[in-house]
Image (cartoon, rainbow, N blue to C red):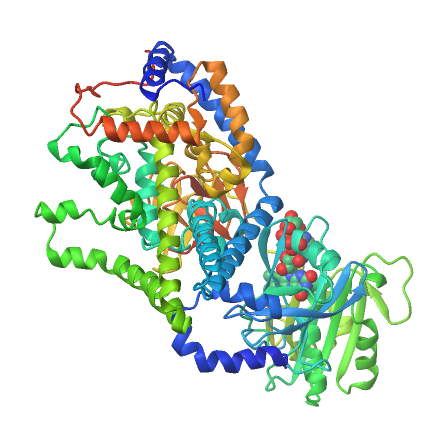
Amino acid sequence: MPDTASVKTGALKRLIGPVIGPVIDPVAFDFWAAKVNPLLSWERPLARVVARQVAARDSVTLVLKPNRHVPPVQAGQHVPVTVEVDGVRLTRSYSPSSVGGKRGKGCLAITVKRIPGGRVSSHLCQNVRVGDVLELGEAFGEMTLRPEVPRWLYIAAGSGITPLMSLLRAQAAGQSRADVTLLYWARTRADLCFLDELRHLDSHQPGVRVHIILTREAALLPGEHSGRPDAALLTQLVPDLAERRVYACGTGGFVDSLRTLLADQVAGFDAEAFTLPERAAVAGAPVQVTLRRSGRVLDIPAGEALLPALEARGIHPKHGCRMGICNSCACDRISGTSENLNTGATQTEPGVVRICISAARSDMTLDL
Amino acid sequence: MTALPPSISSRAARKSLSRERLSREQVEQFGAELDALRERTLADIGEQDARYIKRIYAAVRYTGALGRGLLFFGIFPPAWLLGTLLLGISKILENMELGHNVMHGQYDWMNDPRFDGKTYEWDIVGTGDNWRKTHNYSHHTYTNIKGMDDDVGYGVLRLFPEQRWRPFFLGQPLYAVIFALFFQWGVAIQDIRLGRYFAGRMTGAELREEFRPTGRKMRRQLLKDYVFFPLLAGPFFLPVLLGNLVANGLRNLWTFMIIFCGHFTANVEVFPKSIIKNETRGQWYLRQLRGSSNLTGSKLLHIMSGNLSHQIEHHLFPDIPARRYAEMSKEVRAICRRYGIFYNTGSLVSQFSQVIWRILRYSLPSKPVKLDGKMLMAD
Ligand SMILES: Cc1cc2nc3c(=O)[nH]c(=O)nc-3n(C[C@H](O)[C@H](O)[C@H](O)COP(=O)(O)OP(=O)(O)OC[C@H]3O[C@@H](n4cnc5c(N)ncnc54)[C@H](O)[C@@H]3O)c2cc1C
């Protein structure tokens, strides 16, 4: 449930919005509104942290109460979370580990694993406290509930458990009697999130089987397994593999190896990778530059200044000085790695890029 | 004050300048030192700068709200005075330290849509988009190049002997006062270039089309300051309207003064178009430096001028957060000293009297000065 204050302003805004909407400055509105309630905003989707629990070693669950601008999230999807770290706004995707649940219908919980040196995960795990406000975006993802599928195999590695957990929870709450086997890989027992709840589901929820596989644990307890994913282990743990549809989630490498192993052995295979493989193209190698607004896709040599490269292909973006001073050619880099040709610095974070002095160093999407 | 009359100090300084011409190689070394200063500063940009610009934003909001609040009690003269002053301060801060700097992309690295240089819209009748073109592009790229930088006299003033005298300029002391009072309107129509219309190079329909966004912005600004807020005050309509008018006027005068001090003091130079042919980064830096002048003063002056009191540093590093210019200016000065380059700075009184002197002096005919072939280097 959105909190009462935002319901009230919601009604207020519906009433006066059409009248004053065109003259209102949303930034100024938010500035004053936040003095009353930090969740109030003219249009920004915000959520307040209402609870914080340590979920496992280096992992923290944050329960979020969204305001009315946060679009609905389905179990299994991921949402962009934006935080400010050292003055810079950074956005990362997190798959809620539960949507709805006992804290109220609109709440969601994200479970974040801290990556050493990771800017957003460290901030979320170490600095964020109850009462803080995060900005959310629109949820994405196709790995959602599909009641028509009779048998599932969920495979998670590390923090990849999150979307699968939220699917399991939704299935358990919906009394759908879904037949789900979960294989959950982690390094050690201390890295496992939701362990009690998973054990409980395994023993009390008909149709649910949970297998824990630990890769770095010295001594295994009964019921635990070890080893990397391979054909032998998979057929041992899941005898009816061929009848199950797979949702897999983990790092890029993990997901890729599963796909090779399983894709034509199972009733269907979908996966989500949490780390995109790092690909900094060498100078001259062709990279794909996608222009979002015009929908054009171009091959451009990595390391070549974007503005002249686009012009050579018949596209004429707005520009000025062609030397990085006037900011006229600034546009949003939605994804991809760019290089500042004046300094040689590379930038992977989505943000503003001056195309006259920047080159692509990976496939890239520009807001042009 | 012991300063020489502007015309005398000007001549003396000009002479010493012409003696100090650098070789091509020295200019590149000079540029490399500025590049290094730029990189050093950029490496340190971060949380403090983000906090600073948010504080400036908050100051704009608080002074604005307080000013407008007090103006509702504007039938009491002290409330009117204080309210008007606070609203003027709010508008000055918003236009200069916030809007102007944000629109240069100085805070783009924050990734914060509130401080996004390419979309920011400021509290003045001119549109952000027009400003980004005339100012960020034309003025900053072609600084003080006659015929390319519209800011050289804004098409109505003759400020340099290199500009051809016409009898029209006899009236320029008057035009300057009018321009100062209505500065925001001048800025608003700068890009429309009515001249093209009068010269018949643009149809009325084209002009109307080009004017549309500006017209919309003007309407919005006028409605806000002269209809919406005065109406909100009910019976005190008139004091609020007058307060808003005076606050806008104060902002106009102040920005005019600061901006003119940045490029039209006695020792700044103008350049011919030929100068940008094959211009290197070092030469670009040197041209920026010789076309700009600074103001000395208190921290308050720097903030209220949007740090355009450090016009030199702003022109060398237009995309670095302006709060850094004060620190950088120490090094820029030291670098200039080492290369024997004149660093043009002075108090507001001294620099602005030089501006006034230029306005008065060049309203009258003067011996024409040729720009052709002017170069920055000795070789
Ligand atoms: C669809 C999707 C859903 C996601 N859901 C979750 C979730 O529910 N919970 C969660 O904790 N994370 C999730 N992630 C990962 C998350 O978005 C961030 O990538 C992660 O938190 C690291 O961000 P950072 O800013 O801390 O690290 P950065 O500062 O971006 O990176 C620091 C270094 O760590 C490396 N790195 C980044 N991510 C990982 C990783 N997962 N494993 C190992 N190395 C890494 C980077 O290559 C880089 O070298 C999801 C990612 C995607 C794409």
Q: Position of residue A283 (x, y in %)?
A: 47, 38
User: For the N terminus of chain B, which image quadrant?
Assistant: top left
Nearer the observer, B103 or A224:
B103
Q: Position of residue A76 (x, y in %)?
A: 62, 74
- Considering only vertical position in the picture, is B364 above or below A190? above
- Considering only vertical position in the picture, is A111 above or below A10? above
Decide if residue A98 is in sight here.
Answer: yes
Q: Is residue A198 left or right of residue B113?
A: right
Q: Residue at x 22, y 40 (%)?
A: B175
Q: Residue at x 77, y 87 (%)?
A: A206
- Considering only vertical position in the picture, is A293 above or below B292? below
- Name the residue at the left extreme: B200
Q: Position of residue A267 (x, y in %)?
A: 61, 77
Question: Within the displayed image, which quadrant is ligand 1 positioned in?
Answer: bottom right
Q: Residue at x 37, y 46 (%)?
A: A329
Q: Position of residue A72 (x, y in %)?
A: 56, 77
